[in-house]
């Protein structure tokens, strides 16, 4: 369905070609290429048990989440360069409270994700991950990278 909730139809001219999402439309400024990863993330984000909405605003929101996720992971991986667990690990008690909170919440997040994947509810994993990116403690636990 379109972002306004209207049925998509070739005769109405409101269909979205996946290639135009990946490669962009004829006018690259008005319809820039978003890439295959954004399209994949959109697919993972929708609850396909009901009507699936798609439009520029929705794809823009998914693009924002994709960029934030990518930059956060890039920041975190960049900080792991040269990390040796035996030499650099910090005892749990010495970690800042936000890091301890994040580590305490991780098992539940992983269990929920595994259960959602087992039930083919990919949107639950996406939503949990997106919430974690947009709301504390993730907003400040990665040193402001989020």
Image (cartoon, rainbow, N blue to C red):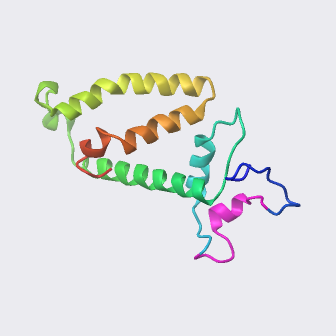
Question: In the displayed structure, would residue 73 be above or below residue 50?
Answer: below
Percent position of residue 60, x then y: 54, 58
Looking at the picture, tell me which residue is in the foreground, 142 or 1. 1
Prevailing secondary structure class for the magenta stretch in the rendered image: loop
Percent position of residue 51, x then y: 72, 40
Percent position of residue 16, x then y: 73, 59
Left or right: residue 80 versus residue 115 is: left
Q: Is residue 19 magenta?
A: yes
**Residue at image location 41% in from the left, 27% down from the top:** 109
Left or right: residue 112 versus residue 48 is: left
Q: Which residues are magenta?
A: 14-29
Looking at the picture, tell me which residue is in the foreground, 45 or 92. 45
Percent position of residue 52, x then y: 70, 43
How many numbered callouts? 0
Looking at the picture, tell me which residue is in the foreground, 139 or 81. 139
**Residue at image location 62% in from the left, 70% down from the top:** 31
Question: In the displayed structure, would residue 145 be above or below residue 103?
Answer: below
Q: Is residue 68 magenta?
A: no
């Amino acid at each position: 369905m379109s972002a306004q909730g209207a049925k998509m139809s070739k005769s109405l001219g409101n269909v979205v070609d996946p290639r135009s999402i990946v490669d962009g439309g004829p006018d690259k400024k008005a319809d820039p290429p978003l890439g295959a990863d954004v399209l994949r993330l959109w697919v993972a984000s929708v609850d396909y048990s009901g009507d699936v909405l798609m439009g520029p605003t929705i794809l823009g929101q998914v693009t924002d989440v994709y960029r934030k996720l990518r930059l956060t992971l890039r920041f975190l991986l960049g900080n792991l360069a040269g990390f040796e667990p035996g030499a650099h690990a910090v005892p749990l008690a010495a970690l800042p409270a936000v890091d301890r909170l994040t580590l305490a919440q991780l098992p539940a997040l992983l269990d929920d994700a595994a259960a959602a994947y087992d039930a083919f509810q990919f949107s639950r994993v996406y939503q949990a991950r997106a919430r974690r990116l947009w709301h504390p403690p993730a907003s400040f636990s990665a040193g402001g990278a989020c």
